[in-house]
Image: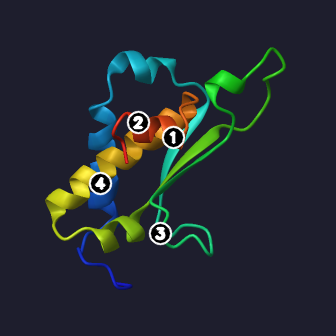
Amino acid sequence: MDGVAVEMSRERFEDLVGDALDEVPPQLLKLMSNVVILVEDDPPPGETELLGLYEGHALTERGWDYAGVLPDRILIFRKPILRICDTEDDVIDEVAITVVHEIAHHFGIDDERLHELGWD
């Protein structure tokens, strides 16, 4: 399965992403606006180590003229996560961390601040 350390179906992986979303406080989920969360097998070419990606306009960057745009996208990349994990429990933890990390970008929190908060 493309050099992954943990074998896991796409369906199971998507369930883990859903479980991670269930752990996000409902107050935060209610604040999320015009964003979809998707699972992709592979990251963009040349980004083989990328576990997740936020594409769009953070809530902190949206102004009065923000209208009529396609939803922002949070992408969670299955194969890179499976490659770096040794057990299913590791996958569960990494999916949760990656989901929180990308949601934080939606709220305008950058990598430096996430690092300060311990979300590496």
Label 3 to label 4: alpha-carbon separation = 13 Å
Mark 1 crowd level (few <14, some 14–19, many ≥20, 10 Å Cα): few
Which amino acid type is shown beneath numbered disc 4?
A: Glu
Q: Secondary structure at mark 3?
A: loop
Tell me, yes or no, whether the two marked residues, 1 and 2, touch with CB atoms within 8 Å.
yes
Residue under circle 1?
112
Which amino acid type is shown beneath numbered disc 2?
A: Glu
Residue under circle 3?
49
Mark 4 crowd level (few <14, some 14–19, many ≥20, 10 Å Cα): some
Give the total number of marks visible in the rendering: 4
Q: Secondary structure at mark 1?
A: helix
Q: Nearer the viewer, residue 114 or 48?
A: 114
Residue under circle 4?
94
Is 86 left, or right, of 77 in this rendering? left
Label 1 to label 4: alpha-carbon separation = 19 Å
Task: Give the vertical position of 60 relative to 46 (above or below).
Answer: above
Q: Which dot, 4 or 2, sits closer to the camera?
A: 2
Label 4 to label 2: alpha-carbon separation = 18 Å
